[in-house]
Every structure is written in structure tokens, then in C-alpha cells.
Image (spheres, grey):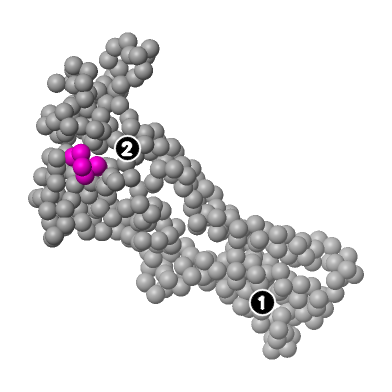
Amino acid sequence: MAYNQTAILAADPASVRDPVCGMTVDPAATRHHSQHAGHTYHFCSNRCRERFDTDPPRYLSPASSVAATATAGEVQWTCPMHPQIVRNEPGSCPICGMALEPMIPAAGEGTNPELRDMTRRFWVGVALAVPLVAIAMGEHIAKPALDSLIGPGAAVWVQLVLATPVVLWCGWPFFQRGWASVLNRRLNMFSLIALGTGIAYGYSLVAALLPGIFPASFRTPDGTVPVYFEPAAVIVILVLLGQVLELRARAQTGSAIRALLDLASKTARVIGDDGRAAAGDPGAAVDDDGRQGPAGDAIQPRCRWIFPARERSGDLRR
């Protein structure tokens, strides 16, 4: 027996989620229920109920069933490279340091807090790094003109003021991830970034504050100690740029998935060959992969969709 389906756009606020497949189910409409640990669970089909009765902990465990735990307003996050990492909030993977992403994209507009944060840090860093690079390059290209504008000693302090927020604030997530990689004994890219920029900035900070502790062989002809604020800041900016591009690409992929989810029907109505709705079916949520319908009939893997009369010239197959 073949079936038609028609989308019901307005979801019932009293609906619940099937713990097996994650579909929206109206408890008053569905005939498939199961008791477990004093709770009643509702299912879209007899097949889902049987799968649940076989192993309830599998579908109620947060680590093994996203559908059972991804309720409204609650999203679980995982690492694209290490799916065993599951968190209840956004962050970074303790193994590779990559930003976590939602395990199941939700319908509607989604925002990526990691992308917003990295973008903000990137543009603040760029605004501070541009004059920093100009000063550092001026020492090699037009040093006499730079010395006439800013003395050698003052140039070091200006570089310190410009580089400090870039390295310590803009690059702070990299130091956090680098330290986490040491604690977890999982050295990764962020371990190298934190080590390189930290040493360059720390050495330059000591050279700016205590230049007298360095021997004469470390000094330039004008008596100052070379500093490396500019390389440390530029490395942080370049890494931030890479993070922004990566997160933006992943966000675009997630937006495409969410757009497809927005097109999906939340509920469906089973229509028989006689053109009438199945008895007792006010719009129960059913799916398209051979599960049992509300009237006890199997849903065909290929089913027909209800269209306006002007478009219904025949069976439209997906």
C-alpha cells in the first residue's frame, strides 16, 4: 500500500522527542509508548519502540544517543577529528585543540561563539600589529628617518605597548590550548604556537625592562637590545586568520545543513490510496524509511507528497 505525506508547518507545543530517532511526536496521537524506570516514553513508530525496549540505556545515555539528550535549548559539542570528545558547551578539543562544533545542527539561524570571538580578536590584533610592523620594518628600511621621529629607546617601549595586548589578549586562546596540551600530554600545533610566541615575547619583555643584564655583545650600536615583539604579534595574527577562515568554512557548511533542516517537515500526515487520512491520525510524526505508520501499516521507502491540486498531475517520486 502506497502513502502520501503532507507537511504540517506548525509544530505542536505539546510534542515530545522520540528518544530513538529524534523525531517530534505528539503523545496524544501516537499509539507507541513504553515504560522505563518510572518514566513513559513516546515513539513515532512501533519499530522505534521495539529498538528502545531492546536496550533503553543505549538511547538514554548522553554519550551514546544524541537524540535523547539534544532537547530544546541543549546542544552537545564534539571535535571533528576526535568524535569521542563530547561537551555540553563550546570550547576546544583537549587532544588537538580544534574548536568544538555541534553534534547535530539545529534548524534556524545558528551562531558560532568561537567564530565571533576569534574574529573580534583578529581585528583588534590587526589594528595594533600594523603600526608595530611599520616600526619594525622602518628600522631596516629607513632607520635614520625613524630615529628622527622616534628615538631608539622610545621605539622599544612603543613596540612593547602595541605587542602586549596582541600576544596576551588576542593570543590568549592559543596559550590556553597549549597549556591544556601539556597537561593532557597531547602536544599539538598550539603547543608550538604558545611556546614560540611566549618565548619571543618574554625575551623581548626582559630586554625592554632590564636591558642592563645583557652583555655588550647582545647590544646594537645605539645601545639597545634587539626585541622580537613584532614576530610574536605577527605569528598570533596569522594563526588567528587561519582560525577565522577555518571556522567560517565550517560555519558555512553548518548553515547549509540548517537550511536543509528548515525545509524538512516536523510532522507528516499519512494519506491512504482513498485520499483519506488514516484513522486516528491528527498529524502524527512519521518518517520515510519503512517504519510503521499510526494505522499499523508500513510506510513505503518511496512515498508520494501531497501538493496543491494544480500541481497534482500524478505521483511525484523523490
Q: Is residue 287 above or below residue 302?
A: below
Q: In this view, does 271 lie to the left or right of 13?
A: left
Q: Residue farthest to the top?
A: 313
Q: In this view, does 164 lie above or below 16?
A: below
Q: What element carries label 2?
A: loop
Q: How far apart are marks 2 and 1 (CA)?
A: 59 Å
Within-10-Å neighbours for mark 2: few <14, some 14–19, many 20+: many
Residue 266, numbered circle: 2
Residue 258 is situated, as x and y percent measured from the top left of the image, at: 42, 41
Q: Residue farthest to the bottom?
A: 213
Q: Is residue 196 left or right of residue 212?
A: left
Residue 159 part of the magenta-drawn span: no
Magenta highlight: main SS: loop
Residue 79 is situated, as x and y percent measured from the top left of the image, at: 37, 56
Q: How many marks?
A: 2
Kind of residue sitting beneath label 1: Ser
Tell me which segment is drawn in magenta: 25-30
